[in-house]
Image (tube, grey):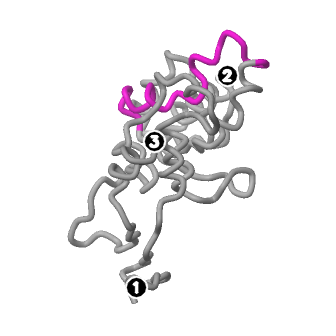
């Protein structure tokens, strides 16, 4: 279901409850505090686009004044045990998943301080959200993988959010077969 505002998110959650089914809410850009635990209780996934938080911060401050504390509430959703997954909303926002990870972790795109840093995600949580909620590769899993030059934690420590956005991808695999192989991997 597509829901951006807090009322729309409440109505969407009510719909899932009434239907007795699970699914996902696309965007969930504003979520009232009382609705946060309902995601996990109902088994509803919050499918969010972290780039929107940094792109929309000025408009949100202007048009949602006084309510931005529950705008793009990624940390609050995770703390409420909701499953949070990332998407890009391309072509509206950048398709690059590293941009989404950096936006969720730092919540700023420019020289300004992070916007509502209380909703920032730790890198490991953001990486899992970018991987559809998966935190590890196990035997029998689909072999959709990315090979990077440096561990993301090292990149973040060395170069911050800008470094994450510029993560060097050496190769990608889909179903265990290379779809991109950089010169280093031959």
If the image is split into quadrants, where does the C terminus sit? bottom left
Tell me the residue that label 3 is attached to: 84
Confirm or deny contact between disc 3 and disc 1 (CB under 8 A). Answer: no
Q: Which residue is rendered at x = 36% and y = 81% of the image?
A: 176
Q: Which residue is rendered at x = 50% and y = 16% of the image?
A: 33
Element at label 1:
strand
In the image, farthest residue toward the top: 66
- Left or right: 126 with respect to 93? left
In the image, farthest residue toward the bottom: 186
If the image is split into quadrants, where does the N terminus sit? top right
Of 121 and 38, which appears nearest the observer? 121
Image height check: is 98 above or below 53?
below
Confirm or deny contact between disc 2 and disc 1 (CB under 8 A). Answer: no
Tell me the residue that label 1 is attached to: 177
Residue 75's image quarter? top left
Query: What residue range appears in magenta?
Result: 62-82
Give whichever of discs 2 and 3 has the lower sequence position: 2
Element at label 3:
strand
């Amino acid at each position: 279901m597509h829901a951006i505002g807090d009322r729309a998110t409440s109505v969407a959650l009510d719909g899932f409850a009434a239907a007795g089914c699970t699914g996902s809410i696309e965007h969930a850009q504003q979520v009232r505090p009382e609705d946060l635990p309902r995601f996990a209780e109902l088994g509803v996934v919050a499918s969010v686009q972290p780039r929107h938080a940094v792109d929309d911060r000025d408009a949100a401050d202007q048009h949602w004044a006084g309510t931005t504390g529950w705008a793009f509430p990624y940390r609050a959703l995770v703390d409420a045990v909701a499953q949070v997954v990332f998407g890009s909303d391309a072509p509206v926002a950048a398709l690059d998943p590293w941009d989404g990870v950096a936006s969720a972790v730092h919540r700023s795109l420019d020289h300004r301080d992070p916007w509502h840093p209380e909703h920032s995600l730790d890198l490991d949580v953001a990486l899992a959200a970018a991987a559809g909620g998966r935190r590890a590769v196990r035997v029998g899993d689909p072999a959709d993988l990315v090979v990077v030059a440096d561990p993301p934690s090292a990149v973040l420590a060395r170069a911050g959010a800008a470094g994450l956005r510029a993560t060097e991808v050496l190769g990608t695999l889909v179903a265990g077969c290379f779809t991109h192989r950089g010169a280093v991997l031959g």
